[in-house]
Image (tube, rainbow, N blue to C red):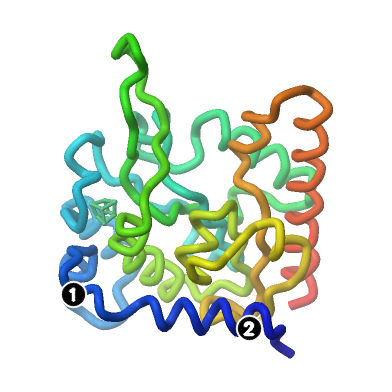
Amino acid sequence: MRESGKESLLAKNHASSGARGEERGAEAFLPPKPEPTLADLKEAAAGCRGCDLYKNATGTVFGEGPARARIVLVGEQPGDQEDRQGRPFVGPAGEVLARALAEAGLERAETYVTNAVKHFKWTPDSRGKRRLHAKPNGGEVRACRPWLAAEIAALKPRVVVILGATAGQSLLGSAFRVGAMRGRDLADTEWAPHAVATIHPSAVLRAPDDAARAEMYEGLVRDLRLAAELLGAE
Ligand code: SF4
């Protein structure tokens, strides 16, 4: 049975998805055929110009994992390492995620990992030497959403894991908040029979001290364990 809070989230999501004709978006770059494969999507996304983020990034960082994956993990956007290597979750946050997945009883190789936004958004540091993560805005998240929707449609996963607020807002609407939605099965979303929200693994790296870091990491593992249980019960 759906919860009223989630129903209102989904309703807001649908209500907010229209009337933005002035915005560009990835829709025009999707492969012109019904039910494209992940390979079709990845090839097409390499040429996406649906928003301005492609201009300052090395390339599109598409999702990665087996086409038979029953669980999909959705993050925010590629980071510096991901942009350089062209693969999602290969930097420090990816290491945290891989460790937490293993502790929760999930094999990263059995999961499909992707991001709400497929190009790296960054600003230079004060010395102009490092590229610092910049949060994608609502228009950029909306512009990129067709790729995420198409990936999930091709995979038909049983469980979607929402890693952080940006992924949640892309999938469940702008009212999504991790703190209010984590730790339970967000059953029967439009994306999969089960969805679990948790923090983005980079939040563990940004924790102010060791105690906070340990607590955040434990919370991440706990939420991933729930995802593993839901997958096992399928
Ligand atoms: S961020 Fe998404 S919508 Fe924008 S150019 Fe990249 S792939 Fe296209």
Amino acid type of the residue tagged 1 in the rendering? Gly
Name, please, the residue furthest toward the top.
127
Horizontal arrangement in the rendering, residue 113 relative to residue 178 (left or right): left
SS at mark 2?
Answer: loop
The verdict on label 1 being within 8 Å of ligand 1 is no
Disc 1 designates what residue?
A: 21
Horizontal arrangement in the rendering, residue 157 relative to residue 21 (left or right): right
Instruction: Look at 33% across and 39% down and name the residue there.
Output: 121
Horizontal arrangement in the rendering, residue 101 relative to residue 90 (left or right): right
**Precedes in sequence: disc 2 or disc 1:** 1
Q: What crowding class fits label 2: few (fewer than 14 Cα within 10 Å), some (14-19), or many (20 or more)?
A: few
Q: CA distance from mark 2 to mark 1?
A: 29 Å
- Residue 95 percent coordinates (x, y): 61, 33
Instruction: Look at 42% across and 35% down and name the residue there.
Output: 79
Disc 2 designates what residue?
A: 188
Picture layout, residue 228 above or below residue 102:
below
Which quarter of the figure has residue 189? bottom right
Amino acid type of the residue tagged 2 in the rendering? Asp
- Residue 86 percent coordinates (x, y): 34, 38
- Name the image quarter holding the C terminus: bottom right
Picture layout, residue 67 above or below residue 102:
below
Which numbered dot is residue 46? none
Picture layout, residue 183 above or below residue 131:
below
- Name the image quarter holding the N terminus: bottom right
